[in-house]
Amino acid sequence: MGKSQSVNSALLQGFCTFEKFCEIAGSASRNAPDKVHFVTTRSCYVRGVIDLHFISASVTSSCLRDTMSLLRFLLLSFAGASTALIISPHVRAHVHRRSAGRAPAPAAVASMAKPTAVVDTAAVEGLRFMTEEQARAVAATHGTPAFVYSEAYLKQQARKALAFPNAYGLTVRFAMKACPNAAVLQTFMRLGLHIDASSGFEVRRAIAAGFAPDQISLSGQEVPADLGELLALGIRFNACSLRQLRRYGELRKGARGVQLGIRFNPGLGSGGTGKTNVGGPSSSFGIWHEQLPEVQRLLKEFDLEPARVHTHIGSGSDPAVWQRVAGLSLALCEKLPTVTALNLGGGYKVGRMLADKSTDLAVVGVPVKAAFEDFAARTGRKLALEVEPGTFLVANAGALVTSVHDVVTTGEAGQTFIKLNAGMTELLRPSLYGAQHPAILVPAAPEAKTSASIFESDAKRYVIVGHCCESGDLVTPAPDEPETLLARNLDKGVAVDDLLVIEGAGAYCSGMATKHYNSFPECPEVLLDEAGNLHLIRKKQAVQEIWANEVPYTPKS
């Protein structure tokens, strides 16, 4: 590999000589053509190996488009390191085929004939909205684990959502399943947001927090047993299946007004993983778009006039996808002449890790607004827009403050594990999705800080696990691979009783945890106000409350 190749020798200064790097790269590629090799700062040896099988799975699950995206993906595990990856020609060709959907041309294969190196100096993750002193104050006052939410960040994100580009009016509904604490709901209520509820129980919870029933829209996978009562209160209801539409018709035959909406699956999905994709033929959410004639038949049978069309495709950030789903949804609106509003749901991706991409609402909203304007010009109907962000509003507004309970090792060829006093009972996303969350070490006392390099000891690379007696209770899996261990670099040495702050824990963490597994009680929740003061917004659960609803039974002998 000559200096005219893609490796820039200047990038390797302080790492190894250019000639030495070429020697390592060539040797590694020849000896293991189906592997990706890592070479890290100050080592000049093959640091790690990842199987081609793992790469192939990652390309599929993460929808990575090209080799460079794959490299950036792999480099996430080396935050803070200057890392070189040596990619063999076999792997490069395979990745190209998997990402492009076809075999590369012979010339393309020839251009991949020599190893390629990428050197990355990723920033070490840090605390988002708390200081180390505030994290210690949370632990001292409320104990650990504890969720902390930033009032300032909640308001910042709400104002961004309220500025979503629109042509003829906008309603922003908070997808409360993301973080249903009353203090969070009330913060958004005061700013003018409405509610997207996913169950009848969430409707009751939102009303208890102070929302008026007509500010609440219900879109659920099941019909609440008390649907009639909820409709009588004045909530808005989106029928998410033909059966739900029939049930609404039976309860509200001949109804008019703004109460009824129809949720469709427009045939298109988007998501970071299959588990966050709620559109397309593999999703059960909404009425399949080709069943529109059956919808029209039920509307006629029960003399109903829907006011809304609702669609929701999943978690994505591609403006082209949102433009396309807006067009598909507007086509459905055109066939339902009483519709006055289109709800495009949520799914605005938020990057929790520094290298992750986030949705810019000001960007994805522009083609959506244009589509509404084109629809109005063509049909004379000016439709209002509704959106339902959840993750966008709260993901990075929350953090989980935990304590290091233990540090164990499985030997020189194994791993060093940090055991926390929290886990899937508070943070399920890593175990469920292979989701990535920043993990920031905060020494128990300020004087415990160290300036030692994170590369001086392999013991500074840790797999972080939870406190449940469950092998799947993993805080640091590989991206999108919940069963694959992935060690993290921490910028300080770790000791028992140090704090570990898990960032990006505002959405689908407290509200989606495996509550009470191993009989761990609910942890407290705290709000950090704009003045920097801490407020308890949920008490730690008394352990007796876990079994308070159990009914004694005496077996007959």
Image (cartoon, rainbow, N blue to C red):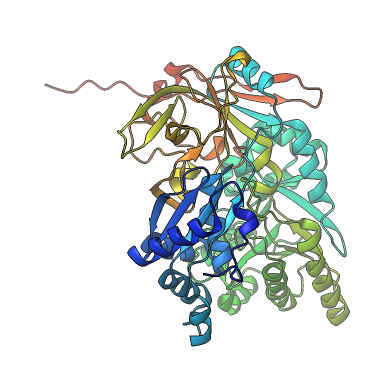
| Identity of the residue drawn at 49% across and 81% down | 110
| Identity of the residue drawn at 39% across and 61% down | 28
| Identity of the residue drawn at 49% across and 17% down | 497
- Horizontal relation, residue 219 to residue 30: left or right: right
Using the rendered image of the protein, determine whether residue 486 is visible from the camera's viewpoint: yes
Of the pair 121 and 522, the residue shown nearer to us:
121
Expressed as whole percent of the image width and height from the top left, the position of residue 159 reads 82, 45
Determine the residue located farthest toward the bottom in the rendered image: 106
Expressed as whole percent of the image width and height from the top left, the position of residue 97 reads 47, 77
Q: Quadrant of the C terminus?
A: top left
With respect to residue 478, does 363 lie above or below? Answer: below
Q: Quadrant of residue 229?
A: top right
Of the pair 55 and 22, the residue shown nearer to us:
22
Q: Quadrant of residue 344?
A: bottom right
| Identity of the residue drawn at 56% across and 76% down | 291
With respect to residue 157, does 107 lie above or below? Answer: below
Expressed as whole percent of the image width and height from the top left, the position of residue 476 reads 47, 41
